[in-house]
Image (cartoon, helix red, strand yellow):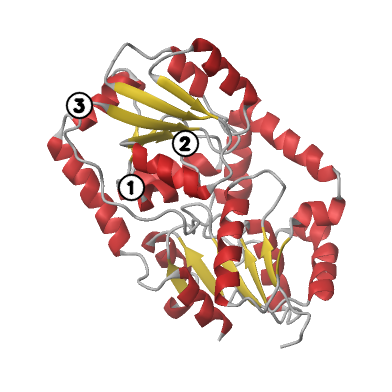
């Protein structure tokens, strides 16, 4: 191995989404496993086109917030419809292949981790054409595999569920090259037992992802007067939402600004009985590790809509149904129903039973051996 070789971690765009959170968690685990190989995280969009990334990111956020139906339709057409067909992504290849090759020449990576489908597709093409020698790993940050992910030529796959493992095996991936870890989260999130089921006072963590998007303010504005419910609201980088909630001075709502400390976030999970959130891959993975009841109030178009479908099949989330009363009534109903709680906890236990017994560090050692 050459002295200048690196471990590359490849998310897409600069928005602090799950692609970055997973890359960061992997980088930390990798550095503990092998501190002699430097780690570098590269967003191929910024690397290739500089400031254009800001325009792309802002357009994406505007699109999913203002015209979600069109984004949902386009994502389905381009990335999910007939998901078993693995077509060339000629447009992406034309836009990014030159820069991807340049990045590989500059860094000469020993191993690269793709936490987004686009760099995975590019890496797959180069591997198939014998133009990439590095060990290449797909790390899936949703609960399904869209059509853009490269499969052929990829050496290893870190997957969230046995269902995704079965999908990859049906496409020719050898079982020993697939590790069912769940979506990787930071090691600060320590698995805990569920809280007692007969609590009189219920605490709920409300999350809209690191950007604070979704329908959080509307939900809390419409809440009823259940005095035994208290909300801790993660506002992310949404300063407007944070200020709105602070100005309301609601004794049952505690707004929390953007948290950078994973340890603080872990402690916050330990304080609550349930999480009210969107079906973003990393947030759900954290909740599952913490054994929390997960209520879904909203799903962004595209990936999150499909995540919700997959998670419902596993029985590890509880979608809020507006036809079945208010959000608060549905949360209280769950905590009043012992049979429902036991079945839900069984579903989470079954999910954990299917995960690898090896630690992430041990899996990384296998990949580098």
Check the image and report above or below for 295 versus 43. Answer: above
Image: 351 above or below 171: above
Count of picture labels? 3
* Rendered-image quadrant of the C terminus: bottom right
Q: How far is the residue under mark 1 from the one under mark 3? A: 30 Å
* Position of residue 4 in the picture relative to residue 270 (left or right): right
Q: Is any part of residue 151 visible from this angle?
A: no
Quadrant location of residue 6? bottom right
Q: State the mark number for residue 313.
A: 1
- Label 3 neighbour load within 10 Å: few <14, some 14-19, many 20+: few
Q: CA distance from mark 3 to mark 2?
A: 26 Å
Between residue 116 and residue 218, name the one nearer to us: 218
Q: Callout 2 environment at 10 Å: few (<14), some (14 to 19), or many (20+)?
A: many
Q: Is residue 46 above or below residue 133?
A: above
Q: Residue at x 48, y 44 (%)?
A: 264
Q: Nearer the viewer, residue 194 or 65?
A: 194
Q: Are marks 2 and 1 in contact (CB under 8 Å)?
A: no
Q: Which residue is disc 3 drawn over?
A: 200
Q: Which mark is residue 278?
A: 2
Residue for point 28% across, 16% down = 227
The percent position of residue 48, horizontal first and vertical second, equals 84, 56
- Please name which of the two marks, 3 or 2, marks the residue nearer to the observer: 3
Mark 3 or 2, nearer chain start: 3
Where is residue 237? Give x, y as percent: 63, 32
367 to the left or right of 200? right
| Front tag of 2 and 1 | 2
Q: Quadrant of the N terminus?
A: bottom right
């Amino acid at each position: 191995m050459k002295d200048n070789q690196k471990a590359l971690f490849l998310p897409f765009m600069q928005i602090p989404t799950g692609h970055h959170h997973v890359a960061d968690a992997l980088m930390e685990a990798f550095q503990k496993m092998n501190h002699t190989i430097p780690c570098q995280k590269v967003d191929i969009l910024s690397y290739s086109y500089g400031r254009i990334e800001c325009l792309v990111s802002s357009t994406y956020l505007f699109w999913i917030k203002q015209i979600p139906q069109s984004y949902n339709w386009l994502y389905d057409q381009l990335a999910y419809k007939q998901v078993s067909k693995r077509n060339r992504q000629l447009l992406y290849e034309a836009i990014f292949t030159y820069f991807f090759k340049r990045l590989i020449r500059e860094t000469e990576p020993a191993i690269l981790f793709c936490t987004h489908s686009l760099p995975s597709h590019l890496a797959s093409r180069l591997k198939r054409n014998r133009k990439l020698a590095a060990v290449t790993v797909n790390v899936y940050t949703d609960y399904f595999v869209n059509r853009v992910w490269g499969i052929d030529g990829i050496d290893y796959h870190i997957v969230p569920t046995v269902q995704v493992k079965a999908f990859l095996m049906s496409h020719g991936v050898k079982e020993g090259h697939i590790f069912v870890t769940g979506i990787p989260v930071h090691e600060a999130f320590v698995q805990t037992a569920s809280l007692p089921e007969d609590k009189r006072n219920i605490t709920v963590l409300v999350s809209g992802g690191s950007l604070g998007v979704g329908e959080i303010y509307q939900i809390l504005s419409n809440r009823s007067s259940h005095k035994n419910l208290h909300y801790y609201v993660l506002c992310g980088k949404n300063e407007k939402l944070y200020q709105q909630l602070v100005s309301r001075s609601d004794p049952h709502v505690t707004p929390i600004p953007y948290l950078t400390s994973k340890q603080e976030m872990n402690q916050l999970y330990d304080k609550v009985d349930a999480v009210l959130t969107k079906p973003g891959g990393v947030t759900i993975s954290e909740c599952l590790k913490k054994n929390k009841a997960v209520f879904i109030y909203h799903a962004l178009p595209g990936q999150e809509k499909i995540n919700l479908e997959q998670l419902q099949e596993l029985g590890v989330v509880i979608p809020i149904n507006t036809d079945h009363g208010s959000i608060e009534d549905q949360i209280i109903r769950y905590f009043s129903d012992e049979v429902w709680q036991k079945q839900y906890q069984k579903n989470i236990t079954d999910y954990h039973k299917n995960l690898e017994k090896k630690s992430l560090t041990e899996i990384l050692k296998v990949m580098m051996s």
